[in-house]
Amino acid sequence: MAKKKKKHGKIESKKAKPFLQFKLGVLLILIILSFLAVFALYMLNATSQEDYWETEILSSLENNSSRNEKSASKNKVSVTNPVPASDRVDETRMSECAFIGDVSSLTAYYDTKTSLVFTDDVTSMSESRMESISRNISNAKAVYLWYDTPDNAEETLTALQNLVTSIHQENSNMPIYILTALPKETLEQSEQADTWNTALFSLADEIGLHYVDISTLLKTNDGVLSASYLDEDILYKNIGETILTHIDDK
């Protein structure tokens, strides 16, 4: 009798699937939900306190306000205005200082550095231009601002303040002098210049600029520009002498 052959079959093994598959997204969602739950409990507990707004919110606002005030006054220096007369310094100071504004005639009369002279209209200066000038004058001994009587005093004062802020942000200890506008040949125009100079004086005291009065020296008793100074050589020599004899770098 023939024996039956046994069939040998292969047993295929199957890997058991894990009960719970790990997913990064699920974990992140759980973490976020947990954080939100804890935060909600904190806020519920905090706002239930009667003095929460005083101790937390208002206190924070007061601290921020105090920091802003300190920052605004950080660069303001104690000044004596108008700047009193001082010992005359050498003319080399003119080449060591920066000049900004209606200064082309003045700086042409003296040995100034072209790289430290800027004749931009301050009301047309962009923020980036102010920042560029401020960086370029970092090696100057001091800065002189000089603008003639403007058509729009309020706009010009605001622009000047912005320029000063930009200069001090780049050069925190830079002395900044502001020169008065010149008197004019007619009384009406001279009175307009006087009004502008009064506004400059207030600005100088407010933000710590050195106010140099070149106007009074050039006036007659009638309040107009003296005929002696119609000659530009004489005019700018006297303006330069006033600058060199009114120094208060501090």
Image (tube, rainbow, N blue to C red):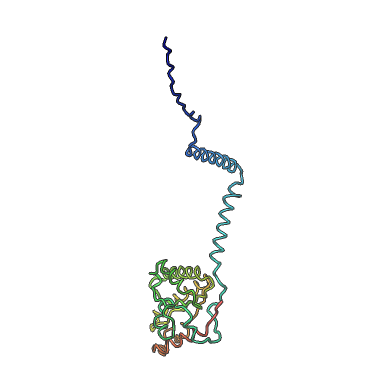
126 sits left or right of 83 in the view: left
Residue closer to the observer: 23 or 73: 23
Whether residue 188 is situated above or below residue 129 in the rendered picture: below
Residue at the image position 55 percent from the left and 82 percent from the top: 84
Q: Above or below — where is 151 with respect to 9?
A: below
Q: Position of residue 112 (x, y in %)?
A: 44, 83
Direction from residue 82 to residue 146 in the image, left or right: left
Quarter occupied by the C terminus:
bottom right
* Residue situated furthest top in the rendering: 1
- Residue drawn where x is 46% and y is 82% of the image: 95
Q: Position of residue 108 (x, y in %)?
A: 40, 84
> In the picture shown, does residue 129 fall above or below 141?
above
Q: How many marks?
A: 0
Q: Nearer the viewer, residue 25 or 152?
A: 25
Residue 230 pos. (x, y %): 39, 88
Name the spot of residue 183 as percent of width and height, x first: 42, 82
Image quarter where the N terminus lies is top left
Residue drawn at point x = 38 percent, y = 72 percent: 151
**For residue 81, what is the image quadrant?**
bottom right
